[in-house]
Image (cartoon, rainbow, N blue to C red):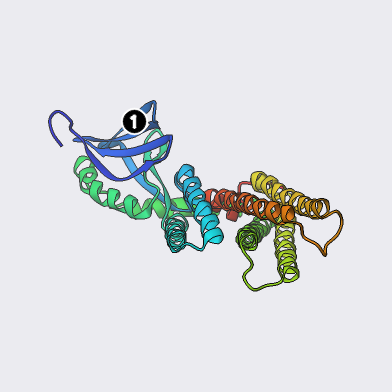
């Protein structure tokens, strides 16, 4: 902190491809900066006006662009490794998988939504999406806020008890049975949301594994007969289709999951088109026969398999990104209605 620039950056910052956000500590206020690469918005919160920091544990995926980059690099490494068996490609594949797993750990278990409460508003701090950063900021600002406002009054616990008693009195005045029905409906919706998300996640993972199998099958033969490879492929298709259909059944009437539902319908349509295209190419390039495999069929199907596998992997990765980006709202299903 200098007279020319009286701010020190606080822990936690959001840096995406387009959006960015950060938090700065000033002499008598904190400065929230958010915006894009082309514009910025500033908001001051004076220490004497801050009433509370609200930290809600929830999944936060972070920048969607970085997810796209990671999965794109993973797709490239996967295609090169399956095609060439290069040790460098396999090492790059392991590094990319490790990076994605670390990011998933941060997104699902160590993320939060942090808001600042003042007398007139509650504002979300978009730069604080990790719990460690939020805790560090609160610990650092605690003394400054206490110095500006003084210590909390002794009657705070009594006020909390009065507020709890008022809520209980309002609950008791509600019509008999109405709250029980609403709570049962919410529990059912949350349960179906969790089942649907778990089934969809598993389905997209199977779709991703199937894409690896397709790329492996498109490479030179590795000891399996073509009939065995074909039946394994049918097994993958049956498993992923069943999982996605079961997931659709669970979330069919949950409005908050419209985007996920539409994406799963697209995944099923993509799988169906891929199967029809494979059968059509097999029949067309062999003249209806299966005993003879001309050279043009072998070469074309190899390249077709590579393209199909990479597209399927990208499709599965996009579905997983969508789920991880909205993990908490999908799992709760509370903001939806039948």
In the rendered image, the residue lying farthest to the top is 39
* Count of labels in the image: 1
- At x 78%, y 51%, the residue is 281
Which residue is farthest right? Answer: 288
**Is 35 displayed left or right of 142 in the figure?**
right
Residue corresponding to mark 1: 43
Q: Position of residue 108 (x, y in %)?
A: 47, 57
x and y percentages locating residue 4 in the rendered image: 14, 28
Residue at x 39%, y 26% (from the top left corner): 38
Tell me if residue 180 can be seen. Answer: no
State the residue lying farthest toward the front. 295
Indicate the position of residue 158 as horizontal and vertical percent values: 37, 54
- Which is more toward the observer, 250 or 102? 102
Q: Quadrant of residue 180?
A: bottom right
Residue situated in front as seen by the camera: 139 or 230: 230
In the image, farthest residue toward the bottom: 223
> In the drawing, does residue 63 fall left or right of residue 181?
left
- Circle 1 sits in a helix, a strand or a loop, which is it? strand
The residue at 43%/55% (across/down) is: 103
Q: Nearer the viewer, residue 312 or 50?
A: 312
- Relative placement, left or right, of 276 versus 88 is right
Residue 81: tell me if it is visible. Answer: yes
- Counting from the top left corner in percent of width and height, residue 145 is at 24, 43
Few, some or many C-alpha atoms within 10 Å of disc 1 (few <14, some 14-19, many ≥20)? few
Tell me the quarter of the image containing the N terminus: top left
């Amino acid at each position: 902190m200098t007279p020319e620039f009286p701010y020190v950056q606080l822990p936690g910052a959001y840096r995406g491809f387009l959006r960015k956000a950060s938090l700065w500590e000033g002499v008598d206020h904190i400065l929230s900066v958010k915006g894009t690469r082309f514009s910025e918005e500033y908001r001051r919160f004076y220490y004497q006006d801050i009433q509370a920091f609200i930290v809600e544990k929830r999944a936060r995926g972070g920048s969607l662009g970085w997810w796209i980059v990671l999965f794109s690099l993973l797709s490239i490494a996967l295609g090169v490794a399956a095609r060439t068996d290069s040790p460098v490609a396999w090492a790059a594949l392991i590094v990319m998988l490790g990076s994605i797993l670390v990011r998933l750990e941060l997104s699902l278990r160590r993320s939060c939504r942090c808001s600042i409460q003042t007398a007139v508003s509650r504002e979300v701090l978009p730069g604080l999406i990790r719990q460690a950063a939020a805790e560090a900021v609160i610990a650092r600002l605690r003394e400054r806020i206490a110095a500006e406002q003084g210590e909390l009054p002794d009657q705070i616990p009594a006020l909390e008890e009065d507020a709890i008693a008022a809520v209980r009195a309002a609950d008791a005045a509600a019509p008999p049975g109405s709250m029980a029905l609403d709570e049962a409906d919410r529990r059912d919706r949350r349960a179906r949301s969790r089942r649907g998300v778990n089934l969809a996640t598993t389905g997209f993972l199977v779709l991703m594994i199937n894409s690896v199998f397709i790329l492996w099958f498109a490479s030179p033969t590795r000891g399996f007969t073509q009939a065995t490879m074909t039946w394994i492929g049918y097994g993958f298709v049956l498993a992923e289709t069943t999982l996605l259909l079961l997931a659709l059944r669970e979330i069919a009437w949950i409005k908050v999951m419209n985007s996920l539902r539409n994406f799963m319908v697209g995944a099923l349509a993509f799988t169906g088109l891929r199967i029809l295209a494979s059968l059509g190419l097999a029949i067309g390039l062999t003249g209806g026969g299966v005993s003879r495999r001309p050279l043009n069929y072998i070469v074309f199907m190899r390249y077709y398999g590579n393209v199909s596998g990479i597209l399927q992997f990208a499709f599965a990765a996009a579905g997983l990104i969508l789920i991880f980006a909205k993990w908490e709202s999908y799992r709760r299903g509370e903001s939806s209605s039948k």
